[in-house]
Every structure is written in C-alpha cells, then in structure tokens.
Amino acid sequence: MAQSKSAARDAEISAQELSDQIATLRADLSELTNIIGNLGKAKGAEMSNKAKDQLEALREEADARAKAMKDQALNVQAQAQDMIQNQPGAAIGIAAGLGFLVGFLSARK
C-alpha cells in the first residue's frame, strides 16, 4: 500500500507540474501575441511614415517642375512681346501665316 500512496502522490505532483507548465505556456503565448501585435503596429506606422515622406517628396518635385514650367512660359511670353515690339511687321506676318494655316487645315475636314 505504501507504493500506491507514493504512486498517487507522484501522479498528483506530475499533474500539478503539468498544470503549472500549461499556465506558463499560456502566459508565454499571451506575451508573444502582444509582442507580435506591437511589432505589426510599429511596422505599420513605419510604412505609413515612409509613404508620407515619399508623398511629400513627390509633391515637392511636382511643385518645382510646375514652377520651372511657369518660368519657361513667362520667358517665352516675354520673348514674344519683345519680338512684337521690335519687329511688328514680322509678328503680323507670322500671325497671318498661322491663321491661314489653321483655316486651311480646318476647311479640309
């Protein structure tokens, strides 16, 4: 009978150890879940910030290109005005020629 009491006590200890190990595993799994969730949030925030930075860079580049195009258009306009003031006869001839060409092309349709 001494053996049966000892075996029962060993089984009870083993069951208690097993229960403790399961509780430890549950706590570890819960902690791992939290860590993975926080990592996902951090990566999401990192990607969001990277996308915002790229968008801002593209916006700045587009603004710079728009300014350059505006400056070029103003330069062409200034050159046209200078030509009209310095050579009015040539400007009228060019305008008449362009008008004739547009009229000719539109009449063919």
Image (cartoon, rainbow, N blue to C red):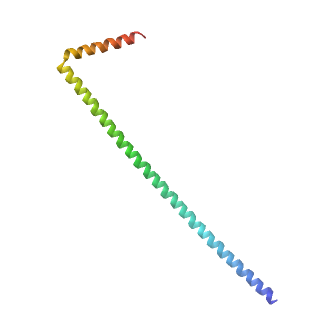
Q: Residue at x 57, y 63 (%)?
A: 33
Q: Work out which residue is located at the far left of the displayed protein and give it.
A: 86
Residue 76 in percent (x, y) is at 26, 27
Place residue 59 in its image quadrant. top left
What x and y, as percent, mark residue 94? 26, 15
What residue do we see at 59% from left, 70% from top?
A: 27
Q: Is residue 52 above or below residue 63?
A: below
Q: Quadrant of residue 97?
A: top left
Left or right of 40, for residue 95: left
The number of discs equals 0
The residue that appears at 26% across and 30% down in the rendered structure is 74
Does residue 25 sit above or below 4 in this rendering?
above
Quadrant for the C terminus in the image? top left
Is residue 45 left or right of 82 when viewed as pictured?
right
**Percent position of residue 66, x then y:** 33, 36
User: Quarter of the image containing the N terminus?
Assistant: bottom right
Against 106, residue 24 (above or below) is below
Q: Residue at x 78, y 87 (%)?
A: 5
Q: Position of residue 89 (x, y in %)?
A: 20, 14
